[in-house]
Amino acid sequence: MTPISRSGAGRRSLATLISGALAAGGLAAAGVTALEPGAASASSHREAPLISGTPQYDNTDVYAFVSPDKPDTTTVIANWIPFEDPAGGPNFYTFAEDAQYDIHIDNNGDAQGELIYRYTFKTHRKNGDTFLYNTGPVDSLDDPDLNITQTYDIDLLRLHDQKLVSRTKVADDIPVAPSNVGKASMPDYTKLRNQAVYKLAGDSTTFAGQADDPFFLDLRVFDLLYGGDLSEVGRDTLKGYNVNSIALQLPTDMITESKDQPIVGIWSTTQRKDARGHYTQVSRLGNPLVNEVVNPQKDKDKFNASSPWEDAQFLKNVTNPELPKLIEAIYKIKAPAEPRNDLVDVFLKGVKGLNQPPHVTPAEELRLNTSIEPTAKPKRLGVLDGDNAGFPNGRRLTDDVIDEALQVVEGELVGSKNDLGDAVNKNDKKFEHSFPYVAEPTAGSRGKTAGGTGNSVRNQLGDGLIANATDGSNTTLIAASAAAGAAGFLLIATGLAWWRRRNRAY
């Protein structure tokens, strides 16, 4: 595997913090009662049997960081619907109408959410007599040619000891950025995205819509841990796929308990309405990499339905993790001694002196110390490389959580120094410098092919329209296909030249 280059001083920074905490805290005897992720794999992309069959409700990743361009605010990004093929029409990707998409904030370390930002969505259809997502080029979110649209509401729930204290309507009927069908359908997708960035009261900002999947890794980890001989590394297997993203930027003083207690714990959940009209939690995500490889098959669905204050039931999966034993069996790298108390602070309580709240209840949450200023040049290994503004202190889009987690699970913090990684060190697309930060989605007309050759392979129909319709008739063709319905299929089946001859006969 490709070695990772980093300074020895940075490499020891988190290990020093953890070793001090272990010595001071006596964690082995402290009665730890929660789950830790400490493993490497896709970050909750198809992580449990039940949720893998219902992608609209499936959380893929959660990110939380102090906003680099507005350091008095905190940004939370939560993604759903893994592996969106950009060309996956005509029914492109929408949030579920019978779901509650929740962002939970624990601002006192008690493993319970004091704040919940709840997103609910509605789908709108202009024309039921066409199969098309859009019936012509789309210039704005209210364009009459955008046939399928979504809007959403946001409610802020305040709780104490799991009991509702108040509910406030934060926003009504905010438009969602659509799926990026392609250049012909959406010639200026940036404009559409910008229209979906919405200012809320109190200097908050929200966005919902399609985005490039920001998680980067080589998913072939599931083929006997990178092929059994490290031959399957170095390819970002999420390249070219999209997700549906919710991004929320909030003034930090709105979500923290006080200036003296700036640490928050964050996770997201999805509740789905059942046949009786009751909502049931079906997905949960905080730290990356939890449910894929820490929990065995028998516990995965149970974890998705559980809450942080119930995590004691998964403790054995944590203290005796399976992944190091598999690595030892395949690659003969000796697994660290158990129980794995070194992982407790990193993933359950937060690191003492960094992102551990006082009187913390151990629980699986993404913990962020909002008082730590953003780094001008983030290091992809975060705290492991001396950059305390990165993972596991929250999670930035650029943090290489696969390499970090691999090194930690193999004993980086207890003296087993290693440079393990999957040789995928950055996302295939550059992230934005301002909210919502995630990269724009890959367009359907230039999407990733099934063979995995990526964006360099062009959709033949899209090229034909651009190459042969310099007079602007590509727009006419799209409108004609929408009106003619079945003729649109003939366009694909028999080619552009035939279609033009037939079109002139009308």
Image (cartoon, rainbow, N blue to C red):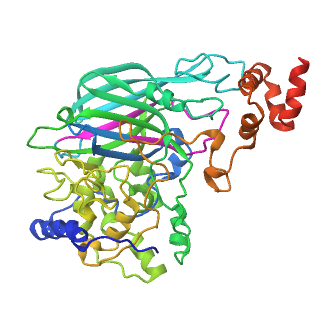
Residue depicted at 84% across the width and 37% down the height: 493
Residue 60 sits above or below residue 253 on the image: below
* Residue 191 is a magenta residue: no
Q: Residue at x 52, y 70 (%)?
A: 226
* In the rendered image, the vertical position of residue 42 relative to residue 173, given as above or below: below
Q: Quadrant of residue 169?
A: top left
In front: 354, or 305? 354
Nearer to the camera, 375 or 281: 375
Query: Residue 91 location in percent, x, y?
Result: 64, 32
- Report the magenta residues as a range: 78-107
Q: Residue at x 46, y 62 (%)?
A: 424
Say whether residue 136 is left or right of residue 288. right
The answer to whether residue 71 of the structure is visible from this angle is yes
- Give the farthest residue toward the front: 471
The answer to whether 292 is drawn above or below residue 5 in the figure is above
Quadrant (top left/top right/bottom left/bottom right) for the C terminus: top right
**Left or right: residue 284 compared with residue 13:** right
Q: Position of residue 31 (x, y in %)?
A: 18, 62
Residue 320 in sight here: no
In the rendered image, residue 254, in percent from the top left (x then y), is placed at 19, 32
Count of residue discs: 0
Q: Is residue 208 left or right of residue 5?
A: right
Q: Relative to residue 161, is residue 259 drawn left or right?
A: left
Q: Position of residue 42 (x, y in %)?
A: 47, 57
Q: Is residue 104 magenta?
A: yes
